[in-house]
Image (cartoon, rainbow, N blue to C red):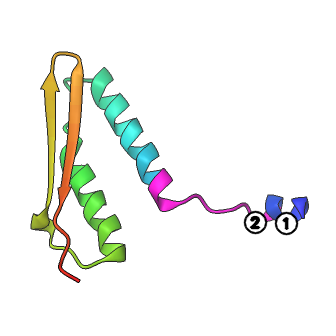
Amino acid sequence: MALLSFLFPPKAKTASEAKERLQIIIARERTGRGGPDFLPALHRELIEVISKYTKVNADNIKLSLDRQGNLEVLEVNVVLPDA
C-alpha cells in the first residue's frame, strides 16, 4: 500500500491550496509594500475557482483590503445565485 501511495500521492484539496495561495500573497504583500497590487489577480483566481462549482457573475464578487496600523483585513463578499 505504501508503494501505491508513493507512486500516486493523494491530491491536495482545492480549499487548502487556495488558503495556502492567499497566505503567500498576503505575506508577500506585507513585506513589499511598494510592489504590485495583488487584489486584481486574486479576484480573477476567485472567479475561476467559484465558477467551477456554481455559476456566478464576476460583478458579484467583491474584494477589499482594509489597513489599520499593523492590522490588515481582507474581506471577500460573494453573492451566490438563488437555488
Q: Determine the residue located farthest toward the top in the rendered image.
A: 69
Question: From what the image shows, is residue 66 above or below residue 77?
Answer: above
Main secondary structure of the magenta stretch:
loop
Q: Determine the residue located farthest toward the bottom in the rendered image.
A: 83
Is the C-beta separation of discs 2 and 1 under 8 Å? yes
Please report the bounds of the magenta region as a residue range: 7-16
Disc 2 element: loop
Residue sitting nearer the eye, 52 or 73: 73
**Numbered circles on residues, count:** 2
Q: Determine the residue located farthest toward the left in the rendered image.
A: 59
User: Residue at the location (36% across, 74% down)?
Assistant: 52
| Residue 73 % position (x, y) | 22, 34
Question: From what the image shows, is residue 14 above or below residue 31?
Answer: below
Residue sitting nearer the eye, 52 or 78: 78
Question: If the image is split into quadrants, where does the C terminus sit?
Answer: bottom left
Q: Which mark is residue 72?
A: none
Q: Is 14 in the magenta?
A: yes
Question: From what the image shows, is residue 68 above or below residue 42?
Answer: above
Label 2 packing within 10 angstroms: few (<14), some (14-19), many (20+): few
Disc 1 element: helix
Task: Tell me where residue 64 sits by quadrant.
Answer: top left
Relative to 52, 57 lies left or right: left
Q: Is 78 in the magenta?
A: no
Q: Which mark is residue 8?
A: 2
User: Residue at the location (35% across, 65% down)?
Assistant: 49
Question: If the image is split into quadrants, where does the N terminus sit?
Answer: bottom right
Task: Tell me where residue 80 sits by quadrant.
Answer: bottom left
Kindly identify the amino acid type of the residue bearing the numbered disc 2: Phe
Question: From what the image shows, is residue 48 above or below residue 67?
Answer: below
| Residue 5 % position (x, y) | 81, 62
Task: Tell me where residue 77 sits by quadrant.
Answer: bottom left
